[in-house]
Amino acid sequence: MSQTVFATPFIGREEELARLFGVLERARGGESRAVLIAGDAGVGKTRVLDEVATRAARSGMTVLTGHCVDVGDVGLPYLPFTEILGLLAADERFAAVLAAHPLVDRLLGAGTDADETGPAPRSGSGEGRLRLFEGMAALLAELSDVTPLLLVLEDLHWADQSSRDLLRFLLSRGFLQRSTGNGSGHRLAVLASYRADDLHRRHPLRPLLAELVRLPAVDRLELRPLADAEVTRLLRALEGRPLPEATVRRIVERAEGNAFYAEELLAATDTEAGGMPSGLADLLLIRVEQLPDTAQQVLRTAAVAGRRVEHDLLRDAVGLPEDELESALREAIGHQLLVAGDDGAYAFRHALAREAVYADLLPGERSRLHGAFAALLAGRGHRAETAAERAHHYRESHELGEALAASLEAADHARRVGAPAEELRHLEALLDLWESVPATALPSGEAADRVTLMLRASAAAAHAGEAHRAVSLTRAALAGVGRDADSELAARVRYTLAGTLMGVDSLTAAFAYSSEALAMIPAEPPTPTWVWAAATHVLAARQVGDSETALRVARQALRAAEQLDLTDARADLLVSLANLEGDGRRSAAGRARLTEARELARRGGNAPVEMRALFTLAIGAFEAGELAQCLPWLTEGLDRARRAGLLSSPYPLEMRYLQLLVLYTLGRWDECLRTATTDLAVLPASGGFAVGPALYVGLARGDKGVADRARTLIEGRFDWMAALVAGIVLTDAAVLSGDAEAAVARLRSSVEALTDEAGMLPDVTVRLTALALTAVAEAAATARHGGDGAAADRWSAIATELLEPARSVALRGATGVPQGPEGRAWLARAEAEWAWATTGPDPAAWERTVAAFGYGDAYELARCRLRYAQALLAAGRREDAATEARAARETAVRLGATPLLERADDLLRRGRLTDAGPAARGGPVALTARERDVLRLLARGRSNRQIGEELFISGKTASVHVSNILAKLSAASRTEAVAIAYRERLLEPEIGASG
């Protein structure tokens, strides 16, 4: 029967679907069951039911859907069952069965008044109702003998009394509890949905549900909110164009897992600037308006308090007697608008409900209630943990002096507990109020200096990962400092600005400001301000390529730091020297300096410097090809950042990216994806740092949406890490699609974007070049084979042009030291691809490349082994080619790298490299029971999707089983796998089988 057609793909709910598909499978085998599906409005009940119904219909079940409608508890009796009978009456297959059951005519309005059960099924006659109920049960049971049935009842919360009674009979005494007489049950399943948030205490469905869930053949399934990652996938599927990450994050946060809310918020993004969509607000307020006036008053007051409010505070603010307040709260809780916590507080069940109620308040009402909450909180004493609430309520009630003082108190509390984002928010609120507050209301002491507060806000912004905001705040501080100001403060502002500018890759300007800062104060006698100005200048000089200046100033500043006993400054300068001296951070001497720096920073209590030392230890190990040794340093560094509340600051972001990159490189892809998902939840503003390696995994696994997500990273303001990640993904995506022109264009644009102001090419140039040269080599080979000498010469020239900069970067590196094993491996691949483009495949070059990637990069090693196999095959070395291709294939199967697996299978098939079957390898092949099921369906010519439908598994899971079967049988294709299976007696011919 017909189902709703949805424009978007089904997302999430894998566990719920598996459970429901299991019910269908048992029903087809004669075990009838029912499932009551609960969920809030908009959470996706209809979408789940439609997905299950579609799958059931494809498997041969007849799906009958009846809907309840909101017409109260009177009128339209038996509506969902009448709708089901109408569907049956329109289907010729069931004409004979329906003719044997006169209740059909009565429920469809064609019965006669003379019938003993009365003129209509709404009759209250006990005997008449019983006959009708038994007739309906008998009809459905008989229909299930003709075809497996799925009965879907939607929106039971709107069901009339008669429908509820009939459902009770069917599930408790009807077909669900009876056998067919031959020991088996009826081939029938019932799925019924209802809104959990509509079931207030007196709702008539509640007692029925309590009764039904006690029945052994009835289960209950609660659809909980979608996970954030699933809402993100839904939004991207709904929107044809790439969505900015900030937009997606904001919608995900507000929707709280509700698919309908997410769709409504997405639809309003272009018109309402992130406000509450009017249609959604109206929908949410309908439920509020159903409450008594007193309960609505309590909700409005609670909305001003925020998402959550303590009972005592709400009582005092609303000003109602205790008994009236409790009655109103009982109504709000019963209608599932508020929920009561174990701590005596109340919270809105969904944040958007609170937003809708708050937005509906009159301006004066809103201001008055904010003032009441501010006064109540102040009356409880100036506790630090309530400072943020007080500041908010004072601001909204226009008591600006009190708001400024409370904002400063809240900022101090946030700094103490390690919450830089909150500290920044309160400091910015304070600075916004500064000009509007009388001088007598301004703070005293250090906080009275606006420039100092701006520098503090800048530091908080940097620690919160808001690099551009940090620059803006420091520039504002600079504007407030004249040349005649205190020289130490002026120098501090300038070297702080230099540090923030390096955070946004404005390196020339950073070097200029650090030079000014160093010139403003004398080096002798040394002062802490000079030492930190020098430490910043060392970083800026190194960034612009002036290593000589950086090394000279670092040594001078280290002596001064030792003289002044500035432990944390000594640590910072030791890290810089480890990067600058000798063979750098990869060397034993460099690591010794870094270990000393870590201990000094820990002793000095400077978390940012300690994290810098730990990151440098980790990146040094990575560059040395010691991947496993990176992870302990990264774990320690991230734990330190977590304890300090600095996970969003620059070095922890770098550590998070490196941690994901190491997991990706080692082939621990599922762990990489899980960690990235966790990072996105913790670090919503981290951009390329958190999503980069996850995008690399997605691309390697054939995710078609990866390229679009990479493009969103480079929209808007330039971000170096985002540009790097996008460059890698989009270059490789062009290569995988066989578009050499696009690959070369993306390589060039990415390198240009990532080249610094001094003209220094980025280290990633080598990797990008090797990737692009793969497409160039293929284009050149195709042109040669096609006899197009001009095109072949053109691509050969492009290959030579691209290779030279990559060679230069690999040999000097970002620090002037040649790149380590990773860089050398990418250069070897670039050289091998260049040879392919200019003269043809060179097995020796690819042998060197495979050896180079042996340092630990599982996926790139497999890709290179496949290219090596191609080169070996071209040279006539078939046995060696088969070995390399199979090794690549095994890795592709293990990693789930579908595109690589397909290319390996294609080479094995085209090269006829699969002669050695399972018997030749010694012994029979061991297939699991599920793999044997999949193999039987493969023999019938089923696609992955069809296999999934017949076995009630996902198409993706079916694909994994198929890949495992091909690997175990050493088969290059599905057809070959079936042939081998018949030959090895893993399959027996099916008599009379058809496709």
Image (cartoon, rainbow, N blue to C red):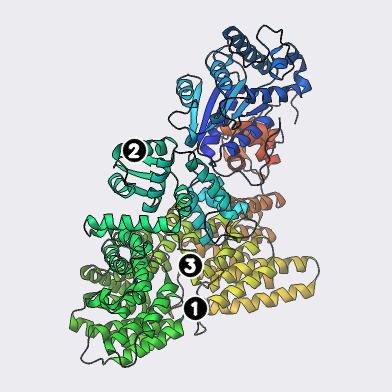
**Disc ID at residue 324:** 2
Percent across and percent down for residue 35 are: 53, 27
CB contact under 8 Å: marks 2 and 1: no
> At label 3, which amino acid type do we have?
Glu
Disc with the residue nearer the chain's start (2 vs 3): 2
Q: 482 or 130: nearer the eye?
A: 130
Quadrant for the C terminus, please.
top right
Residue 731 visible here: yes
Quadrant for the N terminus, please.
top right
Left or right, residue 221 beside residue 976? left
Residue farthest right in this picture = 787
**Residue corresponding to mark 3:** 822
Percent across and percent down for residue 9 are: 63, 45
| Residue occupying image coordinates x 71% and y 26% | 989
Mark 1: secondary structure:
helix
Percent across and percent down for residue 167 are: 56, 20
Q: 818 or 529: nearer the eye?
A: 529
Disc with the residue nearer the chain's start (2 vs 1): 2
Mark 3: secondary structure:
helix
> At label 1, which amino acid type do we have?
Leu
**Residue corresponding to mark 1:** 811
